[in-house]
Image (spheres, helix red, strand yellow):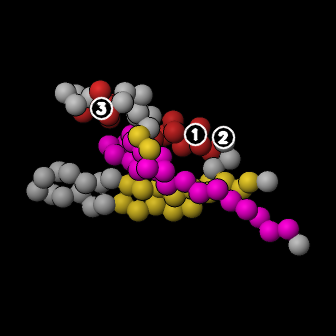
């Protein structure tokens, strides 16, 4: 009996940008090159909806998520971790 095998991926989302995939920076601008402009580094990451479309086309299925609550005093938070799986042959 053949059992299914899967790969897993964890994606970190900040301000509707996918900033990390499996712990690796996902922006086009390297973090070390963006010390003076963290906003530019963040904006170099893919937008969430475009990323989800692409990941889905590659066969990834979202299986869960966690979300941090927004801190009402500072306005920070609202970050998410998305969990995906993909069947492998």
Of all residues shown, which one is farthest toward the bottom? 1
Asked if residue 3 is among those painted magenta in the image, a careful observer would answer yes
Q: Are marks 3 and 2 in contact (CB under 8 Å)?
A: no
Q: Residue 88 is drawn in which quadrant?
A: bottom right
Quadrant in which the N terminus is drawn: bottom right
One can see residue 39 in this view: no
Q: Which residue is under mark 2?
A: 57
Answer left or right for 29 relative to 88: left
Q: In this view, does 53 lie above or below 1?
A: above
Q: Are marks 1 and 2 in contact (CB under 8 Å)?
A: yes
Answer left or right for 62 relative to 15: right
31 or 76, which is in the foreground? 31
Residue 18 position, x and y percent, is 42, 42
> Element type at marker 1?
helix
> Element type at marker 2?
helix
Q: Mark 2 or mark 3, which is nearer the start of the sequence?
A: 3
Q: Is residue 35 above or below residue 63?
A: above
Of circles 3 and 1, which is in front? Answer: 3
Neighbours of disc 3 within 10 Å: few (<14), some (14-19), many (20+): few
Q: Distance between the residues labelled 1 and 2?
A: 6 Å
Neighbours of disc 1 within 10 Å: few (<14), some (14-19), many (20+): few
Q: Distance between the residues labelled 3 and 2?
A: 31 Å
Q: Is residue 45 above or below residue 55?
A: above
Neighbours of disc 2 within 10 Å: few (<14), some (14-19), many (20+): few
Q: Which residue is under mark 1?
A: 53
Of all residues shown, which one is farthest toward the right? 1
State the residue at coordinates (41%, 62%).
66
State the residue at coordinates (59%, 38%).
54
Q: Which residue is under mark 3?
A: 32
**Part of the protein shown in magenta:** 2-23
> Element type at marker 3?
helix
């Amino acid at each position: 009996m053949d059992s299914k095998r899967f790969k897993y991926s964890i994606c970190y989302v900040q301000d509707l940008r996918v900033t990390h995939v499996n712990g690796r920076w996902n922006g086009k601008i390297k973090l070390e090159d963006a010390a003076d402009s963290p906003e530019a580094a963040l904006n170099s990451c893919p937008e969430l909806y475009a990323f989800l479309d692409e990941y889905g086309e590659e066969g990834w299925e979202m299986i869960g998520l966690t979300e941090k609550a927004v801190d009402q005093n500072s306005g920070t938070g609202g970050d998410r971790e998305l969990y995906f799986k993909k069947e492998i042959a």
